[in-house]
Image (spheres, helix red, strand yellow):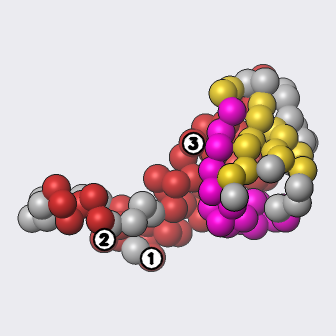
Amino acid sequence: MLITFKSHASQDLIMMKDLAMTLLGIIGKHLGERGVITTEEMPRAIQKLEAAVTDAKRTHPANAAVSPDKSDEELEEEPLHLGQRAYPFLDMLRASQREGVDVLWGV
């Protein structure tokens, strides 16, 4: 199932349900059929996501940097770490905060 995040500050962001649940869980939200991250909630949501990304890099440093001795095939098979997966969502939150608009989501 795909979840679509919308904001007047950026393009729509479509992600898989499991990733949406993870990212929303980090910021203290639950994935319902529809939801909102208000402008008042934005600073804390951004702070929580940034902290989770930093923690993930610290906990799994091998995922944070590309190893020079790995082939292109091996690199393609490695899963994306939280920072790579969270970046588009963080970008949307930051843009929405700058413009003072909410982020909405729905299925």
Q: Is residue 32 magenta?
A: no
Answer with the quarter of the image where residue 16 lies: bottom right
Q: Amino acid at mark 2?
A: Ala
Tally the marks. Answer: 3
For disc 3, the marked residue is 88
Discs 3/1, front: 3
Magenta highlight range: 12-30
Q: Where is 56 relative to 12, above or below? A: below
Residue type at tag 1: Thr
Instruction: Please tell me the numbered disc located at residue 59.
Output: 1
> Residue 19: x, y in percent?
63, 61
The residue under label 2 is 62
- Describe residue 16's horizontal placement relative to residue 53 as left or right: right
Residue in the image at 73% along x and 24% along y: 9
Name of the residue lying farthest toward the left: 69
SS state under label 3: helix
Residue at 57% x, 53% y: name it: 86
Query: Marks 2/3: CA distance?
Result: 21 Å
